[in-house]
Image: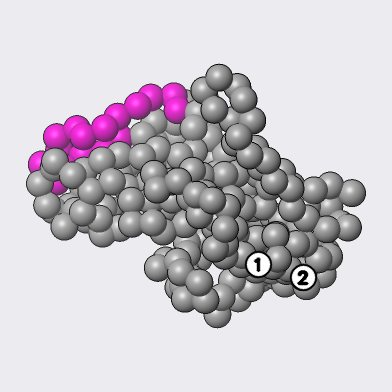
Amino acid sequence: MQDIFITKINHNGKVIKANSYGGSGSDKSNSIFAKSDGSIVFVGYFQGEATFDNKSIIANNQSDVFIAVFDENRKDNMILSFGDISQEKINSLICDHNNNIIFTGSFRKSFTFGSEYYVSNGRDDIFIAKLRNVKENNYQTQANSYSSISSENIKIQVIPNPTNGKIDIYILGILDEHTDIDLKDIFGRTIFTKKDIIKNHFDINLSGKNNGIYLLTIKTQNKTFIEKIIKQ
């Protein structure tokens, strides 16, 4: 029904390499990340059985999610799949400076990620997950799930926390038109501020800042949410 393709194009618009992956079901990739060493990570969801070169994965039921890691020659790849009895999707990913893979998506009914198991509170819940120390058949999993998100119920995810430098801030919820973000050190000095934000993701580099506690504030029209960040 649908397959996945990846195309590499040079600065002149010439196609250098193109590959396709998938199976007889509906397979889709929503996000790709090109790393500085030439390797790529891409994520998505698949139905039934999907093949990536000579490796195949099989969904548990309606659709499962996959994470694919290819080297610069599109070889020595690692393909992982996660899911449960219903429907799971991945929407976006990033790789942090420690080569951890962080991605977000949604699941219906329940979701199994490594040794962790989540049950949705409604029709669909959302999740943020991290793969750490990613190597062939050797990785660690970490995840959180959230439900019933609205501008009155915002969740803040800071990765990593504690940190020794760059942090990624995820604001989970529906932002109203007057949502502000503000990061201050323990003495009240402003590190980062922005008003009337529309994005749900920010990255801030604290590498040149003093070690200690920082306070992240997300303020909507009716509520204020505060998250403590530790710089080591």
| Residue named by callout 2 | 58
Lateral position of residue 92 relative to residue 1, left or right: left
Residue at image x 12%, y 52%? 211
In reply to whether residue 191 is colored magenta, the answer given is yes
The residue carrying mark 1 is 81
162 lies left or right of 67? left
Label 1: few (<14), some (14–19) or many (≥20) C-alpha neighbours in 10 Å: many
Is residue 23 left or right of 21 when viewed as pictured? right
Give residue 116's quadrant in the image: bottom right
* Foreground pick, 226 / 200: 200
Considering every residue shown, the one lying at the far bottom of the view is 115
Q: Position of residue 168 (x, y in %)?
A: 37, 46
Question: Quick one: SS at disc 1?
Answer: strand
Residue closest to the eye, 228 or 169:
169
Decide: is 51 above or below 157.
below
Q: Which residues are magenta?
A: 182-197
Task: Pick whichever, 67 or 176, lies toward us.
Answer: 67
Mark 1–mark 2 Cα distance, whole angstroms, equals: 8 Å
Left of 222 or right of it: where is 105?
A: right
Q: Are marks 1 and 2 in contact (CB under 8 Å)?
A: yes
Residue in the picture at 70% in, 59% down: 52
